[in-house]
Amino acid sequence: MKKTLLLALVAMVSFASFANGQKESGKIVIGANIYSFADNFMNGVVKPELESYAKTKGVEIQIVDSEGQQAKLNDQVDVFITKGVNVLAINLVDPAAAQTIINKARAAKIPLILFNKEATEPGAMASYDKVWYVGTDSAEAGVIQGKMMVSDWKKNPAWDKNGDGTVQYVMLKGEPGHPDAEARTVESVKAFRDAGINVEQLALEADPNWSTVHGNDKMAAWLTSSFGSKIELVICNNDGMAFGAITALKAAGVKLPIYGVDALDQAITHIADGEMNGTVLNDGKNQARATVDLAVNAAMGKNVTEGTNWKVQTNGTKAVRVAYIGVTAANYMEYKK
Ligand code: BGC
Ligand code: CA
């Protein structure tokens, strides 16, 4: 009996020192995730910058793959908390599940930076004084993409294949319920209406994974559908899906104007080659840097923007929003690596 008690005590003490060990070593540890390592933008742009920027700051960042499963992320957060990380940097799988993560961080008294997927539950951000968001103004990408398309449409009368003055378009939307996907879907098309140009949506497809494979499959199916020959414009809410659509267009020997969002390296190459008409730079590098900067300051109990140029919005969203920039054939050289 005594022995059991002793063993239990030893276990408790060593667990406690393990839990606090990272804090005691003096090095700040950020417990982070990416909602899916299969995402072109998150895995190709944001993750490498989180890692390299954390290194320059002298902090440790542990990044796990949530594999597109919110339940998995919930468990990963529990593990980070048990391990005693100093701060959490979380890329939600489900933007409507922020409150669960916020509750966990609050209970453990650990600051939390959400990034890339903004919480959609009303009141979630206000429920904890140590949660902030780093991302973009979701609508801005759609506004910029829309203006770009309107201007090109006006310059290219031949794009109106049936000459009816209306844009017959198809849209690859991305993840339903994701604030970026929802806002881009509305704003890009609104730009045409605002310019007095009629639009007709021939098809719209959502894809929770924003993926190239899905973009390819959908575009291929649309091209062989009853409305295939009517398509005049392809709007993609991210580059990843656009890459797949471009492959499908090429395979079918069809050339259509096509636009994306993110300005991934491959998109710049497609623009250079005349295979893509435009994209919008989603500045993942600076989003990653802001995430790390805020996380480190929060872990040290400082004002989150101390010593940085980031601005936290005071309108209740507690968000740092990194600006988007339009990229077309006219300026892609500036973004070429
Ligand atoms: C990006 C997409 C990405 C998504 C992931 C968006 O901001 O534009 O490419 O798939 O974030 O949440
Ligand atoms: Ca038309």
Image (spheres, grey):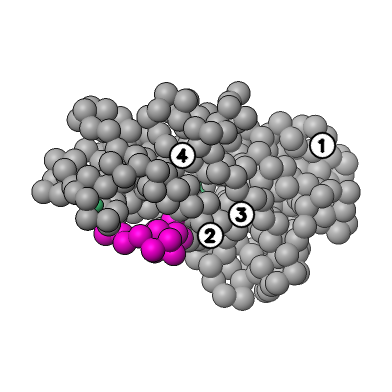
- Residue 136 image label: 3
The answer to whether residue 37 is visible is no
Task: Tell me how far mark 4 sits from mark 3, CA to CA.
Answer: 19 Å
Q: Residue at x 81, y 56 (%)?
A: 304
Q: Is residue 212 above or below residue 319?
A: above
Residue 247, quarter of the rendered image: top left
Q: Is residue 124 magenta?
A: no
Segment colored magenta: 187-203
SS category of the residue bearing label 4: strand
Mark 3 or 2: the one toward you? 2
* x and y, in percent, of residue 19 in the image: 76, 48
Which kind of residue does numbered mark 3 sit on?
Answer: Thr
Name the residue tied to disc 1.
57
Mark 1 CB lies closer than 8 A to ligand 1: no
Name the residue tied to disc 2.
139
Which kind of residue does numbered mark 1 sit on?
Answer: Lys
Q: Is residue 188 magenta?
A: yes
Mark found first going from the N terminus, 2 or 1 = 1
SS category of the residue bearing label 1: loop
Position of residue 190 in the picture relative to residue 118 (left or right)? left
The residue carrying pointer 2 sits among few (fewer than 14), some (14 to 19) or many (20 or more) residues within 10 Å by Cα, namely: some
Task: Tell me how far mark 3 sits from mark 2, CA to CA.
Answer: 9 Å
Mark 3 CB lies closer than 8 A to ligand 1: yes
Mark found first going from the N terminus, 4 or 3 = 3
Task: Tell me how far mark 2 sits from mark 1, CA to CA.
Answer: 32 Å
